[in-house]
């Protein structure tokens, strides 16, 4: 069962934590703005599917974050081929590069945050 409070604190807190720790690199704040909504759209269902089945670990959720980012990049590339004037094919390449770095960090840091908050909040299942 997924603790909803811990889940949403982890899913939203992980990108914020990574951005706060790396804001001096300039890129992560832009990644938060540009990739944050996409991350939430894809991370929420992936993590809701995985967390009840497996104990969340940094490595496991980092791989899921990487995989989700690559699926999004592949979908962008596919739609870029279908709609050549959209510019999605160039955006897909940039998203794949940035997603390969940021996706695992955001996904990975969701695991320790979830585990920390799960013990501190009431455990109520989401489904």
Image (cartoon, grey):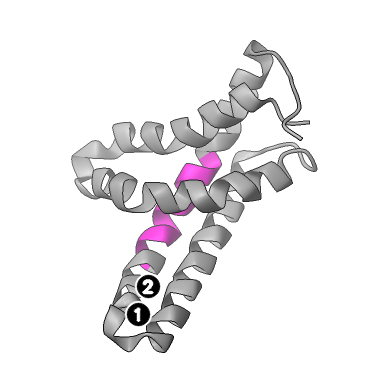
Drawn side of residue 107 relative to residue 52, left or right:
left
**Is residue 104 rendered magenta in the image?**
yes
| Callouts 1 and 2 close, C-beta under 8 Å | yes
Task: Work out whether 50 lies above or below 110.
Answer: below
Residue at image location 46% in from the left, 45% down from the top: 105
Q: Which dot marks residue 92?
A: 2
Helix, strand or loop at disc 2? helix
Q: Is mark 1 on a helix, strand or loop?
A: helix
Q: What stretch is highlighted in magenta?
A: 97-108
Look at the picture and state if 108 lies above or below 97: above
Vertical position of residue 4 compared to residue 53: above or below: above
Q: Residue at x 55, y 59 (%)?
A: 68
The secondary structure that most of the magenta stretch takes on is helix
Q: Where is residue 29 in the image (x, y as percent from the top left)?
A: 25, 43
Q: In which quarter of the image is residue 58?
A: top right
Viewer-proximal residue among 118 and 108: 118
* Residue at 68% in and 15% down: 119
Question: Residue 21: x percent and y percent?
Answer: 32, 33
Residue 120 position within the rendered picture, expressed as x and y whole percent measured from the top left? 63, 12
Q: In this view, does 120 lie to the left or right of 65?
A: right
Disc 1: which residue: 89
């Amino acid at each position: 069962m997924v603790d909803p409070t811990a889940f949403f604190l982890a899913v939203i807190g992980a990108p914020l934590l990574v951005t706060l720790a790396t804001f001096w690199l300039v890129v992560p704040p832009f990644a938060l703005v540009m990739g944050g909504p996409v991350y939430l759209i894809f991370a929420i269902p992936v993590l809701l599917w995985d967390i009840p089945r497996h104990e969340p670990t940094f490595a496991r959720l980092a791989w899921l974050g990487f995989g989700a980012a690559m699926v999004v990049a592949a979908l962008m590339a596919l739609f870029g081929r279908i709609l050549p004037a959209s510019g999605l094919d160039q955006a897909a390449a940039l998203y794949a590069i940035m997603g390969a770095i940021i996706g695992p960090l955001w996904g990975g840091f969701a695991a320790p945050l979830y585990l920390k908050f799960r013990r501190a909040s009431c455990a109520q299942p989401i489904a």
